[in-house]
Image (tube, helix red, strand yellow):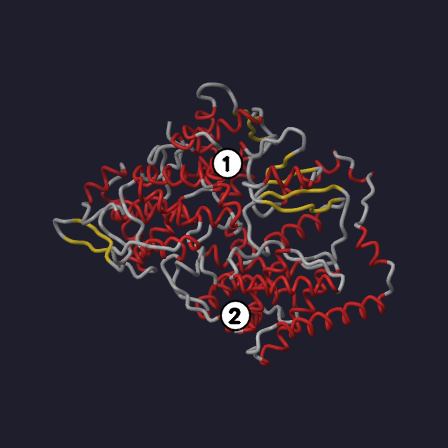
């Protein structure tokens, strides 16, 4: 039987909760009447109980599903691994499907062809095309209507690809991303060909080839330190490149790419292998599109600091909250923006926090969106909801900042996040729950390795994980009140209140100092490092940035001293000359009894490039 889009969401909600949910709770969650929810639940009941009874209900208790973990996962696969039109898509999804069809068509497509492909009425198609027109206009793409011919998307190739990339990014559910990352680590080719995402068949076929190629390159990809979002974007762009070439729409010219061996990275080899599967050569402009997207930002590194100041000032003014005094926000946002100067541009990344942030912090979100369009780009391929949400996370960390004392139940959080997300989740969990310590964060792809290394008491994940020896709690990307209650319950089960947390030796050493001695020690070490770093900089060091470098060094010393160094923030490669310089920086820190990690060193490398050029 067919389920509507909302009925699918209701079913997923029931599958992800062990306890009963009332019709009233569901009506509030979906913002519709209880009567409408009950109509939906009738269809959900029929679907769940088709082969075996899973759906149960009881007056004054609510609705729930009785199934073990494997049964629930199987039901999710049946629910989400559907063919393209086996359910009733929402208008936005239908619009995305129409855009996909036109992006894969060389020429016009008639209204009747749309009706046949979508299995909807002419009136619905006309309404959806109006929505398509509004979406396309944001990317400087025009929906052309021509009598007797039909409809076509008209615009520059880079604009059409920007639109196409955005549509495909939004076509993936959180579950789809989990499935992709799971299959990347799998050696089964059969599994990769069996996967389905409920999207256009032509795109799925290309994506399966890309996924198979990426899986073969998994070890090389892991060494680049691309996160899950980057990998997804790389695969989507390779898919778009091949799909558009198949209808004779290259990015620009047909010049074949010729790279020296030392410049041939893993993305180059992946793209080359996929193109060869389809009988194409890897073109220069296609490779540029894959690694850089459709827009060249052209941001001068020396303007990043000024841009950061402008964003913080604008957001402070619009929200009425003074963020300007938060130096940690300034630093984190600066390093986040440094990614815009990288060779690799993955700005169209999936962000699971968008809906939560827009719902709970709309004023903040809108302020960041407006200033980002002014300071960075007004192109939605770059400044979109996901991009804005990642910046918003840094501001939310600033709002949430308090002194957090490490607790005794060790938790590893599994998600696909960027810098800033980890701090926010850590503070939210530790402020809401006593007796816990965030042992670390990891992407799904590296989850098992991280868990084996960190040996946590509890795993909290936005993806389903099959781990037998450690309890796993499935939560929303930004843990909700219900998620917090589930974590609290598990902490109590683990006996957190009766365990004693042991602080690290370095932190115990800090507590032996009095405040005056500690402050003096940090200042002296910071100044010593700063003077030594200045001496190793090239002769063209711009004194204009001397104060900025001083501040960066002092903040780095402070972070290292208090064991709060950065997590991974950059995937760009440094030249041989830059690596030698960074090794000298590392020696300077070591000479001052400061053990700097690789992520902090990468951040230092980005900053030295700024101040030394």
Q: Residue furthest top?
A: 52
Q: Nearer the viewer, residue 472 or 234?
A: 234
Label 2 environment density (alpha carbons within 10 Å; few <14, some 14–19, many ≥20): many
- Measuring from the top left, give residue 437's x and y in whole percent: 73, 46
Is label 2 in a helix, a strand or a loop?
A: helix
Q: Which residue is mark 2?
A: 304
The relative height of residue 56 versus residue 274 in the rendered view (above or below) is above
Q: Residue furthest left?
A: 148
Tell whether 205 sits left or right of 45. left
Residue appearing at x 56%, y 39% in the figure = 25
Q: Nearer the viewer, residue 14 or 559?
A: 559
The relative height of residue 505 versus residue 19 in the rendered view (above or below) is below
- Measuring from the top left, give residue 548's x and y in whole percent: 62, 74
Locate the N terminus and report the quarter of the image it occupies.
top left
Res. 567 in view: yes
Residue 609: mark in rendering? none
Tell whether 283 sits left or right of 300. left
Q: Nearer the viewer, residue 477 or 192?
A: 192
Q: Which residue is mark 1?
A: 185
Is label 1 in a helix, a strand or a loop?
A: loop
Q: Residue furthest bottom?
A: 543
Q: Image quarter for residue 550?
A: bottom right
Res. 486 in view: no
What distance separates the C-alpha of mark 1 from that of mark 2? Answer: 37 Å
- Measuring from the top left, give residue 262's x and y in whole percent: 44, 54
Residue appearing at x 42%, y 30% in the figure = 189
Whichever of callouts 1 and 2 sits on the residue coming sooner in the sequence is 1
Front position among marks 1 and 2: 1
Q: Nearer the viewer, residue 16 or 179?
A: 179
- Measuring from the top left, give residue 182's x and y in whole percent: 50, 36
Residue contact between numbered discs 1 and 2, judged by CB atoms under 8 Å:
no
């Amino acid at each position: 039987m067919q389920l509507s889009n909302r009925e699918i969401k209701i079913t997923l909600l029931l599958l992800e909760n062990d306890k009963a949910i009332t019709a009233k709770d569901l009506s509030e969650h979906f913002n519709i009447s209880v009567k409408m929810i009950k109509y939906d639940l009738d269809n959900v009941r029929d679907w769940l109980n088709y082969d075996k009874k899973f759906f149960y209900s009881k007056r004054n208790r609510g609705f729930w599903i009785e199934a073990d973990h494997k049964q629930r996962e199987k039901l999710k696969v049946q629910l989400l691994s559907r063919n393209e039109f086996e359910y009733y898509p929402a208008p936005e999804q239908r619009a995305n499907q129409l855009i996909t069809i036109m992006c894969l068509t060389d020429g016009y497509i008639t209204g009747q062809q749309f009706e046949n492909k979508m299995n909807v009425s002419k009136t619905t198609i006309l309404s959806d095309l109006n929505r398509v027109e509004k979406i396309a206009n944001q990317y400087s793409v025009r929906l052309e209507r021509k009598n007797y011919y039909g409809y076509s998307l008209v615009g520059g190739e880079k604009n059409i690809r920007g639109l196409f990339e955005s549509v495909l990014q939004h076509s993936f559910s959180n579950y789809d991303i989990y499935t992709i990352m799971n299959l990347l680590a799998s050696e089964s080719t059969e599994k990769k060909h069996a996967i389905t995402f409920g999207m256009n068949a032509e795109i799925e076929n290309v994506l399966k080839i890309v996924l198979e190629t990426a899986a073969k390159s998994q070890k090389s990809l892991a060494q680049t330190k691309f996160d899950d979002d980057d990998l997804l974007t790389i695969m989507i762009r390779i898919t778009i490149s091949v799909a558009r070439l198949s209808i004779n729409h290259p990015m620009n010219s047909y010049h074949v790419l010729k790279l020296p061996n030392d410049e041939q990275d893993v993305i180059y080899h992946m793209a080359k292998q996929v193109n060869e599967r389809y009988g194409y050569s890897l073109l220069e402009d296609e490779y540029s599109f894959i690694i850089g997207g459709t827009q060249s930002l052209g941001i001068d590194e020396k303007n990043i600091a000024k841009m950061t100041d402008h964003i913080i000032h604008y957001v402070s003014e619009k929200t009425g909250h003074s963020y300007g005094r938060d130096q940690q926000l300034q630093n984190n946002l600066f390093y986040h923006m440094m990614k815009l100067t990288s060779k690799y541009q993955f700005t169209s990344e999936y962000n699971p926090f968008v809906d939560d942030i827009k719902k709970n912090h709309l004023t903040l979100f809108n302020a960041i969106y407006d200033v980002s369009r002014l300071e960075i780009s007004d192109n939605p391929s770059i400044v979109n909801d996901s991009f804005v949400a990642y910046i918003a996370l840094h501001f939310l960390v600033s709002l949430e900042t308090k002194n957090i004392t490490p607790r005794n139940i060790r938790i590893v959080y599994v998600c696909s996040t960027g810098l800033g997300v980890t701090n926010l989740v850590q503070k939210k969990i530790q402020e809401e729950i006593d007796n816990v310590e965030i042992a670390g964060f990891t992407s799904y792809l590296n989850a098992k390795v991280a868990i084996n290394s960190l040996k946590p008491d509890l795993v909290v994940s936005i993806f389903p994980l099959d781990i037998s020896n450690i309890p796993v709690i499935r939560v929303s990307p930004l843990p909700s009140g219900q998620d917090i209650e589930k974590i609290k319950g598990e902490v109590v089960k683990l006996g957190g209140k009766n365990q004693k947390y042991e602080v690290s030796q370095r932190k115990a050493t800090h507590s032996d100092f009095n405040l005056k001695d500690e402050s003096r020690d940090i200042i002296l070490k910071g100044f010593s490092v700063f003077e030594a770093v200045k001496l190793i900089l090239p002769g063209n060091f711009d004194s204009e940035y001397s104060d900025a470098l001083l501040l960066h060094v002092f903040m780095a010393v402070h972070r290292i001293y208090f064991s709060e160094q950065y997590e991974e923030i950059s995937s760009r490669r440094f030249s041989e000359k830059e690596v030698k310089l960074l090794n000298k920086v590392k020696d300077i820190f070591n000479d001052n009894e400061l053990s700097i990690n690789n992520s902090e060193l990468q951040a230092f490398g980005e900053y030295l490039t700024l101040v030394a050029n």
